[in-house]
Amino acid sequence: MDTVSELLDWFQTSGGSLDRSSVGFTVFPGCGRGAVALKDIPEGHVLFKIPRGLLLSAETSSLPGLIGLDRWKEAKMHMGWVGLILCMMWETVQGPSSKWSKYLESLPKTFDTPMFWSDAELGELKGTSVVDKLGKADAEKDFTEKLLPMVQSRPDLFLPETISVYYTLEIYHVMGSRILSRSFDVEKDEDQPEEDAGDETDGVAANTSLGSAMDVDLPQEETESAHGDSEHTDGDEDAEDEEEEPSGVSMVPLADMLNARYDSENAKLFHEKDDLRMVSTKPIKAGEQIWNTYGDLPNAELLRRYGHVDLVPLPNGELGNPGDVVEITADLAVAVLQTGDDAATKERIDWWLEQGGDDVVVLESDLEVPLALVSLIRLLRLTADEWEKTVEKDKVPKPKLDTEVLAVVYAVLERRLKEYPSTFDDDVELLRDESLSLNRRLALVVRIGEKRILQSAIQKIKGQQLEAQKGDGSRKRKTRPDQEGERMSKTQRR
């Protein structure tokens, strides 16, 4: 019996419900294993139900209770993903005695994500935001300072002879990658005590800042338009995010077998009181793949989290990801303006952050200049007197995009483009090389997508500057006849 068949049998004998007449699992070229419609499926059809007891999390595993919840929190195992990773490691060691034995056996053991790339391969991602977001150093710090001390302190739970086999740094990264690529943000059961319910808002799954793979929506009877409304961001880098308790981050058997592709979602996971339900969100034809959603992420995030990229037709006829973005740091604006007063600049940046601003702004494929970038540039260009008045008003400058600010934006984008080690044309030409390794090809796709946005935005600004210059010239020409008429009138009056 193959792994999938064993998983499905385990799922159903453990209380899960699967419509086997409608849903099958197969391997799709270029996508790997995924779900397929075995017959025409109408919108709103329940494909399968997962009992909450089958979710694998730090709340459902017995390990935290065996260690002692006070000790668990004292060791900060409830912060970040380290606790869930340890639970998954421990459950793996339990073998068949673990409720999730068959599920854990079905999960991937290797990944193509940049977390496992060589230094040379990571060099291909220079200029993108991928490398800085890997969080590899922070993850290894958690492994060394949190997980290993916990494991070594309880030889009754973690047999010494198992540590070098099952509790290694390599397996730690594999478990973390499983969570990053396959976990869901799950809303807590309403019957749980309030103090354990996490931070929830309007009933939507909490803790989305921790960057798990997919979100769970509200029950259908509560909303019919919830698909894709939940937004999640990653939190590998932010220290404050690391202090949050990811009580809703769970591994969800079967649901994590669905693939995703840009703007292709036709199924969504909804939570009910006793279970989670994968429900079709539109009609699905027999033979079509059943797609979940990752939130239409840019290729940089798809590569970082899942090890693949999306290439779909763009309006200009090329292939790319319409969700691609370019991240621009505040440092670039500071470098372009060259204020010369580091202390004063730092003061303004600190104030900007206190006001809710960010040190990174996002340029999207619509090529609209980010309002936050405009506001930040105007803040950095204020005179000393203007700066004092702004602080008194306790409001950041309005994002007014005049010609002077537009010139700064232009320079910022040009500087951002130079952060890549190669040109757009070079990358496009290189992508035609069929002998490229998969990782290098993926890195090229990410770079090209970002450079396409930057170059298009720069061209757009050039056009705006030319229009502004024409407008200035037109206004000057219009004033001359009036001025001449005024002079003639004065002569006649004399």
Image (cartoon, rainbow, N blue to C red):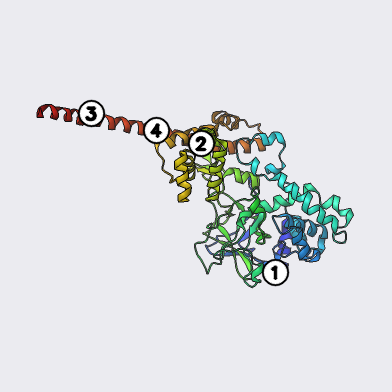
Q: CA distance from mark 1 to mark 3?
A: 85 Å
Q: Residues within 10 Å of mark 1 (few under 14, many from 20)?
A: some
**Labels 1 & 3 near each other (Cβ < 8 A):** no
Disc 1 from disc 4: Cα separation: 64 Å
Q: Between marks 3 and 4, how big is the CA–CA gap?
A: 23 Å
Front label number (3 vs 2): 3
**Circles 1 and 2: CB distance less than 8 Å?**
no
Q: Secondary structure at mark 3?
A: helix
Residue type at mark 1 is Gly
Q: Is residue 178 visible?
A: yes
Circle 3 packing at 10 Å, graded few (<14), some (14-19), many (20+), is few
Q: Earlier in the sequence, mark 3 or mark 4?
A: 4
At which x and y percent is residue 449? 55, 38
Q: CA distance from mark 1 to mark 2?
A: 51 Å
Q: Which residue is mark 4?
A: 465
- What is the number of the mark on residue 480? 3
- Distance between mark 3 and mark 2 Cα atoms: 40 Å
